Image: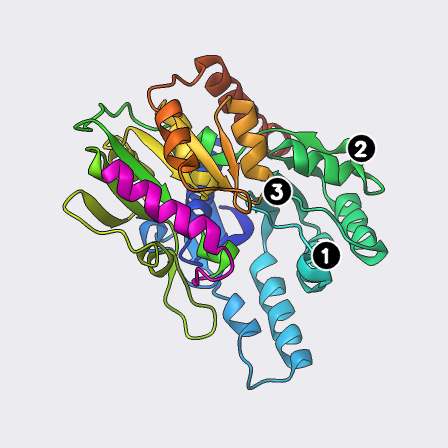
Amino acid sequence: MTKFFLYGYYGFGNVGDDLLLAAIIRRLRKAVPDASFAVRSLHPVAELQSRDIEFTCQERILLQSNLPKWRRLLDYLSANWRALAGCRAMVFGGGTLFHARGGALTNLLLIFLAVLQARLRGVRVFVLGAGVAEMPGVAARLLMAAILALSEDFAVRDASSWRHCRQVFGGKHVRRTADLVFSLQLPAVPTTSAGKTIGVTLAASDIGSAIGAYPQFFTALAADLASLRDNGWSIRLLSFQELDDPQAGVSDTQLLQAIGIEGERVELQRVSSDPEALCRQFAELDIVVGMRFHGLVMAALLGLPFVGIGRDSKLSDFCQDAGMPFLSLSDVNAGQIAETILAAAGRMLDSANLASWQALSAENFGPIEEYLK
């Protein structure tokens, strides 16, 4: 049996990250039918549990505030070492894994130590379709350079990640591909929308569960969605992340409810982590609007128009590549959201763009599949 250690933000209740995990497992199983997986996670992912997938749940170690930091780090690294035993490869799969938000180096340091452990175990490291944030300061750049040097292959999903890597020593060998979700072989799902249905996403993991930080945006969003509802549009408020955890809780539902829009044509819906079920949910929509990157990716896969809203370069990059509108979270005014939705509704996504993203996504797996032969 060929074992892989998969490293990502898995089991955090985020549908986007769980889709990335599904994409990796499906593709590696196709390349290696006897594959088994140890998955770095906070919790198991219910839709993906099987006999050949072990969810390590090792992220819970870092949340044990009753233990000193040195003990948590030691226990965490011990869990890494055990998970890497007998592995053929360590795979980082999608998501903005490489960052030093707020100047904190903890995340990059943990990744560097995990990569170093893999190499000490004789395990090769592959990074597939990852997101890389800008590296603030010399220490962050040095850690990132070390991670790049220890990786067998390093592929990033978008232009911003590619630029950020190029600013780091050793970043010139980084490949630009596309998001891993584009590699999913999804069934053709007929549109079941009754017409004029908007899917709306917000990201509590990005802006928190309170609306106070962006009062202008939430005031405009509530007014514009109410206006669209009153003009015959149905509103689906789509929750992409629900993590009921006392130490790391996140809820898109709370944020969506804070908009304060209600009515007969307004529905709050938790989206599925199962790719096929998610396709059926999105087939009921006519346009997708919001902050969740994989909400926009799913719209693209189904040929739906979309409007990105946020403050993240991955959203603006993707909307620009797709020829779809993007609104900055801090600059939205009343009337602008509704106007942009109406202008984008019915717009056709260029099929050549979708074919290109799917081909680039498949290229994520080229080097690791060659290594596995």
Q: Earlier in the sequence, mark 3 or mark 2?
A: 3
What residue span does the magenta drawing correspond to? Answer: 209-229
Decide: is 366 above or below 350. below
Kindly report the distance in space between the C-alpha atoms of the residues bearing marks 3 and 1. 16 Å
Observer-side mark, 3 or 1, equals 3
- State the residue in front, 73 or 263: 263
Q: Is residue 25 left or right of residue 271?
A: right
Q: Is residue 244 magenta?
A: no
Q: Earlier in the sequence, mark 3 or mark 1?
A: 1
Tell me which corner region of the image, top left, top right, bottom left or bottom right, holds residue 245: bottom left
Q: Which residue is mark 2?
A: 172
Kindly report the distance in space between the C-alpha atoms of the residues bearing marks 1 and 2. 19 Å
Q: Is residue 216 magenta?
A: yes
Q: Disc 3 vs disc 1: Cβ atoms closer than 8 Å? A: no
User: For numbered disc 3, what is the local secondary structure?
Assistant: loop
Residue depicted at x 79% and y 38%: 171
Classify 10 Å Cα crowding around label 2: few (below 14), some (14-19), many (20 and above). few
Q: Quadrant of the C terminus?
A: top right
User: For numbered disc 2, what is the local secondary structure?
Assistant: helix
Q: Is residue 48 left or right of residue 285?
A: right
Q: Position of residue 23 (x, y in %)?
A: 45, 38
Q: Which residue is mark 1?
A: 112
Q: Position of residue 33 (x, y in %)?
A: 43, 36
